[in-house]
Image (spheres, rainbow, N blue to C red):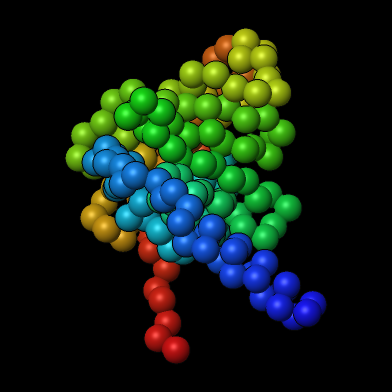
Amino acid sequence: MKIFILSLIISIFSLSLANAEKPASKTFSPEFNKMKALSGNWQGKIKDKGKVSTINVNYKVSSGGSSVVETLFPGTSQEMVSIYTEVDGKLNMTHYCALQNQPTLRLMNSTANTFEFDYVNGQNLSVKQDAHMHSLKLSFKGKNTLLQQWTQFKNGKAVGEHNVTLSRAATSNR
């Protein structure tokens, strides 16, 4: 009897999942689709205060295709995450920074190969005094090269730029 009841519960649960409402197919902006195309592992160099370091970055399409998660320095103490989404048809990103704040940037200008984001709001920061990432310029150089220019602000003005040159990491055929 217990097996019958368990089987009945599993069957009802399976039917409810099969009949669950699936989200309607959504059309995204060309800019968001370009961000989705970055999916995978990237490697490169970051220039910060005159010092050049190696960087790994991962892009992953998530949330039913409605977000792109960018992980900078994955698996290290410097790991940071930026999440790209669309808000009212406009590309936005929230950067979960090692500075322990979360600025949100909105795409203000774009061409086929350049996206320029600027600060619109943030969490855990005073935009007029705290250090935070305030703007980002992405430059696409073909399908396998991406340049990032992050501008950091403090006390209401630019105090530094972090330039990143990334190349799509080679994938192995296993």
In this orientation, which residue lies closer to the viewer: 108 or 56?
108
Vertical order, 134 against 93 (above or below): above
Query: Residue furthest toward the right?
Result: 2
Query: Residue furthest toward the front?
Result: 1
Direction from residue 20 to residue 88 in the image, left or right: left
Residue 153 in which image quadrant:
top right
- How many marks the image carries: the answer is 0
In this orientation, which residue lies closer to the viewer: 88 or 92?
88
Direction from residue 38 to residue 57 in the image, left or right: right
Query: Residue furthest toward the bottom?
Result: 174
Quarter of the image containing the N terminus? bottom right
**x 67%, y 14%: residue:** 126
Vertical order, 154 against 90 (above or below): above
Quarter of the image containing the C terminus? bottom left
Direction from residue 156 to residue 147 in the image, left or right: left
In this orientation, does residue 138 appear?
A: yes
**x 56%, y 51%: residue:** 72
**x 39%, y 34%: residue:** 86
In this orientation, does residue 163 appear?
A: no
Q: In x, y percent, where is residue 138?
A: 36, 40
Q: In x, y percent, where is residue 135?
A: 46, 27
Q: In x, y percent, where is residue 15?
A: 52, 63
In this orientation, which residue lies closer to the viewer: 9 or 152?
9
**x 56%, y 36%: residue:** 95
Q: In x, y percent, where is residue 74?
A: 62, 58
